[in-house]
Each structure stands twice: as C-alpha cells, then as structure tokens.
Image (tube, grey):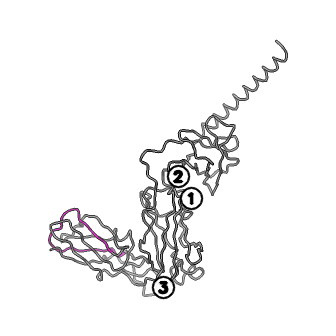
C-alpha cells in the first residue's frame, strides 16, 4: 500500500474513533438529563424556553437535535435560579432541541404543535372593581382566565405608578408563599399592613402605601405566563382614585334587605351600602331557614361590591329566614364586624376576637 494513502487512512480511522468516542461521551451525559423545561408561547409561537436550577451554568447554548456545530441564535437571561433562552426566531414546531453548558447537555425539549382550541390567558378582573378606594385599602385580588405559573416572584409582573409623576412605587407586601387560590387563577396581593397601621415603624419611616387625593395605576405585565407557558400577550391596567380612610366597621343591621318572592327561585338582594371584600362577602354569609338549615344557592357580588345577590337552588318557601354573617367579614380597609384594622395595639379599648355571628332576618311571603 502506498505510504501516503496509508497515512490518510490512519487519519480517517483516528477521526472516526474520536467522533465515536465523543458520541459515546455525549450520549452518556445526555442520558442523565432530567431538567424540566417550560416552553413559553406568545399566541401561536414558541418564543422562549425556561428552566429552574440551583446549579451555576456557563457558556449556555441551544442546538437543534443532531446539529452541534451551529447554535440557535438568541439571548440567555438569568435571574436567581431561573434560566430563560429567547431565540431571535421562534422555535420550530416539531423540532427537538438540546441546551448545553460548555460541552455538557443539561436539558432538552421538543416543540409540540399548539393544541387546537387553546386559550390565551387574560386578566378577567381586578378587585376592588370600583374606581375609588379608601386610603387604607388592604388587599387587591387579580383574577385570571387560566391557571398561572408560579415561577419567580409574582410582583415582578406587577407595576404600581403614581399618576401625577409616573413614579413607580413599592406598595405590596412581598410574601415567601404567595396567596393563590386552589386552581391558581386568583392571586391576593396585600398592601403593606405595617405601613397602613399608624404608629408602627414602617408607617413612620415610609408612610402609608397610598395617599388620599392621588391616583394610582396598577399594571399587570404581558409577559406573565400560564401553566402551559402561554403569555398574557398584552398588559392589563386599572387606575384607582384614592379617597379618605375608611374608619367605620361594617354594621349588619344597617344593610338593606330586598326579600325574594315565595314559590320561585327569585333573587334575594343585600345592599351593604359600602363595598366589602370581594372574596369574603361570598364566603362568610349564609342564608338559614327556620329549621336552621343552610340554603344552597349562588352568590354574586355586584355594583363594585356594594350589592350581594343570592339565588337558591330550589324555590323559596314562605317563612322567616336569617342572614348569618361571620364576624370576620371585612370591608376594603380590613375592618371587620368586631374591630377596625388600624387600631392602637396598646389600647385597652381593643375588643377581643369574637366568634359570634351577626344576623338579620327577612320574611318570604
């Protein structure tokens, strides 16, 4: 055999062996990968991929499956333990991808087709739904159409600005465990209670979160994603005008009751004469018949939280009924039936917590 040809063949053998060795090494590394990757969508496009890891990775790149020569062009964003890769061009449907740190595969994912009939998430409502709120507002509820992700901090997607000068403000209490309902469609945000309660150190140092006479806009960022990785797609904003503090407890006997008609499933209407907490108003009121049984039915809060309606599952029977109210029912400022939210903690006038329910009667004729 010609010496030159023999030399070329040996080089080919070496290259094949090197490639074979690299392939074995790569496959061994890839077989141990178990990182969960979330694909984030904007409408019908897969626009980024995210994963959470406490490990520190360097030189992160994304490659299409079977092609480790040319990485996908895009940007890596790292925040705490959240890694997000956003390609310049959205990922291709049906394509498999690998995420490498140096030469090690740390994650892989495949872009599947969007399920027909998928729903883009949206913010349905923000409570209080009224445009005017008291200076000592305690809570805000955000209701979504779809279950939302809990990646990072929810407050990263919530912006509060004072309208006079567009100043961004930090008004909400940051909690280690965020307050979601069971199906992850409602988030409760607390305005910092330490700043609302007078004479507490946060109140003295920073003042109350909101001030009477000002307007504030709360914006929910379009990049917030649901459990399927689909983004809201557009911002949601609501502007509140702040009035004076609410320093009066709810009083049940002052409510206006509009009784229903008998022998039909007509509506019972309760006028609170002030907006009450949107969630608690539907959870802490029961309609009781003369046999002390709870009447089953549907509650709806209307007129920005001022009115509560109740429609029973079965027709009303003539008789006397009671509206029983748990004493923990609150107005927008957190004042319940027993005491005000903002009281002097050293005062002897503070009433002890009471489990006694308040009630008012009405007659169905």
Q: In which quarter of the view is residue 151 placed? A: bottom right
Q: Is label 1 in a helix, a strand or a loop? A: loop
Q: Quadrant of the N terminus?
A: top right
Residue bearing mark 1: 152
Disc 3 crowd, CA 10 A, few/some/many (<14, 14-19, 20+): some
What residue sits 27% from the left and 77% below the top? 359
Q: Is residue 298 magenta?
A: no
Figure quadrant of the C terminus: bottom left
Front position among marks 1 and 3: 1
Q: Is residue 306 left or right of residue 98?
A: left
C-alpha separation, residue under disc 2 versus residue under disc 1? 19 Å
What segment carries the magenta color? 307-328
Identify the residue at the far right of this view.
3
Residue 313 is left or right of residue 134, and the answer is left
Instruction: Describe the element under mark 2 as helix, strand or loop.
Output: strand
Residue 42 numbered mark, or none: 2
> In the image, is residue 207 above or below residue 175?
below
Q: Give how far across and how far down residue 315 sits, in percent.
A: 18, 65
Residue 116 position in % (x across, y down): 43, 45
**Secondary structure type for disc 3:** loop
Displayed quadrant of residue 12: top right
The stretch drawn in magenta includes residue 316: yes
Labels 1 and 3 touching (C-beta < 8 A): no
Looking at marks 2 and 1 on the same chain, the residue that comes earlier in the sequence is marked by 2
Ranked by sequence position, the earlier of labels 1 and 3 is: 1
Label 3, label 2: how far apart the Cα atoms are: 50 Å
Instruction: Answer left or right for 162 relative to 144.
Output: right
Q: Looking at the image, is mark 3 or mark 2 earlier in the sequence?
A: 2
């Amino acid at each position: 055999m010609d010496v030159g040809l023999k030399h070329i063949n040996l080089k080919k053998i070496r290259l094949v062996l090197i490639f074979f060795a690299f392939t074995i090494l790569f496959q061994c590394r890839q077989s141990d990968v178990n990182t969960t990757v979330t694909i984030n969508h904007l409408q019908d496009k897969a626009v980024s991929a995210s994963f959470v890891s406490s490990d520190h990775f360097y030189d992160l790149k994304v490659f299409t499956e079977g092609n480790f020569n040319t990485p996908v062009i895009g940007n890596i964003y790292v925040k705490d333990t959240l890694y997000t890769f956003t390609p310049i061009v959205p990922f291709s449907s049906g394509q498999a991808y690998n995420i490498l740190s140096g030469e090690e595969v740390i994650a892989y994912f495949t872009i599947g087709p969007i399920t027909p009939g998928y729903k883009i998430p949206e913010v349905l409502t923000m409570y209080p739904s009224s445009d005017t709120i008291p200076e000592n507002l305690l809570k805000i509820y955000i209701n979504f159409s779809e279950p939302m992700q809990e990646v990072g901090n929810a407050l990263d997607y919530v912006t509060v600005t004072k309208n006079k000068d567009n100043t961004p403000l930090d008004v909400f209490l940051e909690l280690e465990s965020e307050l979601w309902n069971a199906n992850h469609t409602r988030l409760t945000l607390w305005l910092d209670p330490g700043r609302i309660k007078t004479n507490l150190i946060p109140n003295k140092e920073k003042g109350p979160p909101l001030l009477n006479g000002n307007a504030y806009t709360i914006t929910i960022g379009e990049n917030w994603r649901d459990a399927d990785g689909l983004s809201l797609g557009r911002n949601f904003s609501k502007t509140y005008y702040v009035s004076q503090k609410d320093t009066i407890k709810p009083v049940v006997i002052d409510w206006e009751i509009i009784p229903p008609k008998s022998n039909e499933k007509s509506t019972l209407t309760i006028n609170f004469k002030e907006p009450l907490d949107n969630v608690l108003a539907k959870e802490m009121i029961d309609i009781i018949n003369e046999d002390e049984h709870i009447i089953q039915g549907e509650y709806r809060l209307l007129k920005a939280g001022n009115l509560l309606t109740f429609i029973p599952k079965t027709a009303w029977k003539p008789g006397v009924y009671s509206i029983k109210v748990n004493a923990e029912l609150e107005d927008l400022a957190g004042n319940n039936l027993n005491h005000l939210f903002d009281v002097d903690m050293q005062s002897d006038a503070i009433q002890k917590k009471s489990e006694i329910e308040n009630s008012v009667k009405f007659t169905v004729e």
